Image: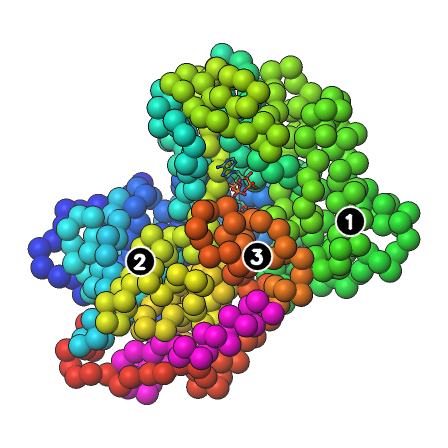
Amino acid sequence: MASENEAPKSGAEHYDVVIIGAGVSGMYAVHHFREMGLSVRAFDGASDVGGTWWYNRYPGARVDGPGSPYYCFTFSDELMEEWNWEETQSEQSAVLEYVEFVADKFDLRRDIQFETWIEDARYDEATQRWTVKTSRGQQVTCRFLICAVGALSTTNVPNIPGIDDFKGETYHTGRWPHEPVSFEGKRVAVIGTGSSGIQAIPEIAKTADHVTVLQRTAQFAFPAGNRPLTDEDRAQARADWEKTKAMMVAHPGGFPHPGNDKAALDYTPEEREAHYEKLWKIGSFHFFLNGYMDVATSEEANKSLSDFVRKKIREIVKDPETADKLMPDHYVMTKRPILEDGYWETYNRDNVTLVDLREDPIERFTETSVITASGEHPLDMLVLATGYDAISGSMLRLNPKGRGGVSLKERWTERFHNYLGMTVNGFPNLFMIHGPGSPGVFYNMPLGAERQMAWIGDFVRHLEKHGLGVGEPTIESEEAWANEVSGIANATLFPRTDSWWTGANVEGKPRYFSAYLGGSIYYMRIGDVASKDYEGFVFEPVRGEDAKAS
Ligand code: NA7
């Protein structure tokens, strides 16, 4: 359990490193900088470690990537030896237990203060230090500010007329209560059919009286292919761990799979169909790891896969009208690929109704119902599976103030200016983890955090070695990085679809594809910058004794 919730201390506290967030990335940051001999303090609004995994307790929540045992930290071989993953697509509770185990093993909580929000973060040019103010009234200064604030943590709550008047239970999947939620005998509406909605809907439908799914965009979803891991699987994973880690580092997404250079258009339609059938049976992320690489770049290749999935949906969903409403019409993969377990079959149940909001939009909520163009749907509960102000949203919520008191919100009006996906001009010694301009959500996130933190650690050593106080990127290097990020994205179909990757899910947000799609190339690029004496950065010498690390 959380142990570091002591009352605020009087006077300012000083650390070398302040870490905002104690999810997977923030936890590793505590360990990494502590190992470097720096003084460290982390803060998190939650009551314990885990970040997204602490908050997302909705029914059906599971790892929806390539899965266990490789969605994990790699910095300690003992973790692979000691932790027994039970399934390939681990449940949320299993991932949370794992991160708690890591926190115990490395005594991370000693340097983490929970139930504490950072209300302000401000750079002081005279001392070359950041000062953060906490919700507990503390003032804490540091030389290095690590923003491990989460790429999927600021919830997106729809602004629908009357939604606040609704008197029934209302839950967002990203802020699910810790107490059990019963759906028994209840009429439940779910808004949202992204990863969270598609995981939650089948579970809710098992016990609810009725489920009304309010769908804005029909989605592609692939079988999760979850299976138990056996003792043999675990023994094999342990025996191969050294080799596996090297594969993970080399792989574009950070997973232990060989690279893939097969192109759909090099095969006949029959060969493609047979390959897709095989992958559909295996499930998990194999469509992306072992599928055809041109699906993300060629309209024709993309259509071969999207036609296949549409056919599968029609085969599973019995009512043709419902199946019609479930037909996705965007390029497959250009919204976050979704793994499902019984989602399509759920529409064969008598207690589930699908409302296509494109044809039948929501007009408003009342105290007891939602009214769409076609009529009123009485409700006892509303589940918002409406996602996040992703990638950039949590940085903007933090809204640090850099040189001259200029806030991130002021700098990020048109675009999320950054260099290497980690640093921002005017915000010296501030580092973002999994921020815009980095591979972030396109990469195995614990491994990505480790690799970004290794780079930041080297940056800190560079400052120490050369008697420098702070470093930050130039505007020119930010522009060049923006061109690089967009250049890679524009060679794919990803920017052509409205998604949280492009910021289209949040009103008023700059709309462009902000992730670095180059995968492992990213880590070569940042290594290259370091090896060239941090090309693209400017540095200031340490300004007097007061400015030195405490
Ligand atoms: P997502 O993938 O952003 O899904 C949110 C869903 O909610 C999606 O279907 C949205 O439709 C829908 N949505 C959002 N706002 C509205 C409004 N106002 N009206 C109707 N429907 C709306 O979030 P998830 O939580 O499912 O997944 C996020 C990641 O978490 C996921 O990739 C995993 O890695 C874990 P849209 O498609 O925008 O039309």
Which residue is denoted by mark 2 in the rendering?
Answer: 399
Quadrant of the snapshot with the C terminus? bottom left
Q: Quadrant of residue 523?
A: bottom right
Q: Are marks 1 and 3 in contact (CB under 8 Å)?
A: no
- Identify the element where label 1 is drawn: helix
Q: Quadrant of residue 181?
A: top left
Q: Is mark 2 within 8 Å of ligand 1?
A: no
Q: Nearer the viewer, mark 2 or mark 3?
A: 2
In the rendered structure, the answer to whether residue 146 lies left or right of residue 136 reads right
Task: Give the mark, 1 or 3, whose residue is nearer the N terminus.
Answer: 1
Residue at 49%, 35% (x, y): give it.
385
In the rendered structure, the answer to whether residue 262 lies left or right of residue 542 reads right
Which residue is denoted by mark 3 in the rendering?
Answer: 442
The x, y position of residue 533, in whole percent, is 44, 86
Start-end of magenta stretch: 459-487
Task: Give the mark, 2 or 3, whose residue is nearer the N terminus.
Answer: 2
Quadrant of the snapshot with the N terminus? top left
Query: Real-space Cα distance between discs 1 and 2?
Result: 41 Å
Query: Real-space Cα distance between discs 2 and 3?
Result: 24 Å
Q: Nearer the viewer, mark 1 or mark 3?
A: 1
Work out whether residue 86 or residue 269 is closer to the camera in this orientation and state it. Answer: 269
Q: Disc 2 marks which amino acid?
A: Asn
Residue 222 lies in the magenta stretch: no
Task: Give the mark, 1 or 2, whose residue is nearer the N terminus.
Answer: 1
Q: Quadrant of residue 175?
A: top left
Q: Disc 3 marks which amino acid?
A: Phe
Query: Real-space Cα distance between discs 1 and 3?
Result: 22 Å
Name the disc covering residue 303, or none: 1
Query: Label 1 neighbourhood size at 10 Å, few (<14), some (14-19), many (20+)?
Result: some
Name the disc covering residue 144, or none: none
Q: Chief secondary structure of the magenta span?
A: helix
In the rendered structure, the answer to whether residue 308 lies left or right of residue 167 reads right
